[in-house]
Image (cartoon, helix red, strand yellow):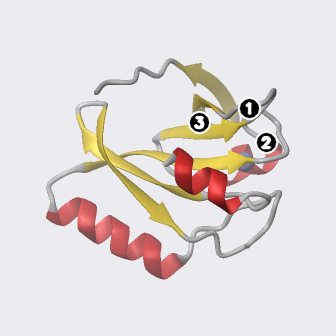
Amino acid sequence: MLDHVDRQVPLEACGLLAGKNDRVEKVILVRNQAQSPARFVMDPYEQLQAFDWIETNGLDLLGIFHSHPAGPETASMTDIAEAAYEVVYLIWSRPKSGWQARGFWIANGRVTEVSLQIIE
Ligand SMILES: [Zn+2]
């Protein structure tokens, strides 16, 4: 996922996180149709294919990730306005030299940070 995020710079990258019981088992990269450094719109065809794959494999959609190559570290106004799913929004940003990922729960215009745990 980080590799993909890094390769898309200066554009925002995006994709889906699927798994079971709050544990991500699969990262699905989706093309950013907006091809923008400040915005992402998932390619609808790829997104549909990804949803199909998740369902076929008996997994749940747990999260949506995207990057902010030029900041901010948290959800933007657009992210809040466009958050359509009850999932964790994982945002990659690079406040200093390297990338970091932070997770947010966005519901009814309110943003709550959630803790992420990396499991091998
Ligand atoms: Zn964003």
- The residues bearing labels 1 and 3 have C-alpha atoms spaced at a distance of 15 Å
Q: Is residue 45 above or below residue 28?
A: below
Q: Image check: 18 left or right of 9?
A: left
Q: In what element is the residue under mark 3? A: strand
Foreground pick, 65 / 100: 100
Q: Residue at x 65, y 51 (%)?
A: 6
Q: Quadrant of the C terminus?
A: top left
Q: Nearer the viewer, mark 2 or mark 3?
A: 2
Residue at 58% x, 68% y is: 42
Of helix, strand and loop, which one carries label 1? loop
Q: CA distance from mark 2 to mark 3?
A: 14 Å
Q: Position of residue 109 (x, y in %)?
A: 70, 37
* Mark 2 within 8 Å of ligand 1, using the beta carbon: yes
Q: Amino acid at mark 3?
A: Ala
The picture quadrant where one finds residue 22 is top left
Which of marks 3 and 1 precedes in the sequence? 1
Residue drawn at x 71%, y 43% is 80
Q: Which residue is mark 1?
A: 74
Please tell me whether mark 1 or mark 3 is closer to you in this view: 1
Q: Earlier in the sequence, mark 2 or mark 3?
A: 2
